[in-house]
Amino acid sequence: MILLSYFEPETNSWRQSTVTQLPAQLAAPLPADARLWINLNDATAAEMQLVLQHFAIAPTLAEDFSRQRHPPKLEAQPDFTLLIMRGYADVDFTEYTSSAQVNLLYSKQVLISRMHCHNPQLLKQLEPQLSNNGSNAVADWVKQLILAVSASYLEKLISFEDEQSDLEDVMLHRGNDEHMARIMRYRSVLRKINRNLAYQKDIFSDAMYEEQNPLLRHFNTADIRDFYEKFERLHSMTDLYYDQLSDLVEGYLSTTSHQINERMKVLTIVSTIFIPLTFIAGIYGMNFIYMPELQMSNGYFMVLTAMALGGISGLIWFKIRGWW
């Protein structure tokens, strides 16, 4: 099903319809002030191909636009520009279901969009704002969608800052394996979205230094710089949070290792004290008839005294050396 939103300059109003094929009036060139948004979210593959063929979209662009999963990308042909972006569609960073895929083909008068998003609230935000009185420039629609994509990350990252702060306090005082599992899940999600943000940051970074970049057809340098700064800031925030979580993991492992070392030190001291005592007990536990010490009336007490002195001497030696 193809959803059409057509702005008629004669009546200064929007006409919206649901059709299975493009209306016949679109076979002719659009009036200069007309605008058209074609929503292909619910379109079949055949309907999508009909639209792309109608506007003579190059096969390479049409193939990328039709994909449900594709890394962020910017490419152009003489009339249309392809922009693929990814938003964050999950509630928080405890899991990563899938990205909100935003596929856009746009020209000066036409916007063709196809969104893949499991979050209804975000999907609603990824719709152009149509107005009878305000600006209906396609560039403004695309700008709104770019900002909506960046906002889908920013809101979650700001919320995550407080959660990470609480997690740091918990790990400092009573960290356990359950908290470690949470941290590992967060790190996995942050690594994935960091990759998406890096792609999108590079799109706008390249646009600032390429004189023939497709974005310059519809946006000025100030807009492109604003897009770049937003995604660069998001990318930096994910890097920062990922590094902080990595520090928490390393700190927890260091603390755990230190605690194990302390326990092993106690066990080593105990073993070192009792090994000589066990050796003495082993000698006098042998059942030989001719053992001179067995005939001594005070032999038992002398051996116990020697064992006690040996154990105490060992403890004093460890204390002097600073090993205990």
Image (tube, rainbow, N blue to C red):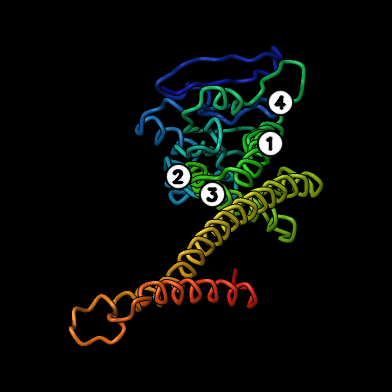
Q: Which residue is mark 3?
A: 187
Q: Looking at numbered disc 4 in the image, what kind of residue is underneath it?
A: Asn
> In this rendering, would 309 be left or right of 276?
right
Which structural element holds mark 2?
helix
For marks 3 and 4 on the same chain, the one whose residue lies earlier in the sequence: 4
Closest to the camera, between mark 3 and mark 4, is 3
Say if 118 sits above or below 236 in the image. above
Closest to the camera, between mark 1 and mark 2, is 1
Alpha-carbon span between mark 2 and mark 3: 35 Å
For marks 2 and 3 on the same chain, the one whose residue lies earlier in the sequence: 2
Q: Which residue is mark 2?
A: 62
Q: Where residue 314 sits in the image (x, y, percent)?
A: 53, 75
Q: Where residue 149 sits in the image (x, y, percent)?
A: 62, 37
Report the disc number at residue 162.
Answer: 1
Q: Which residue is mark 4?
A: 136
Q: Where residue 50 sits in the image (x, y, percent)?
A: 40, 33
> In this rendering, would 120 be left or right of 59?
right
Tell how many labels.
4
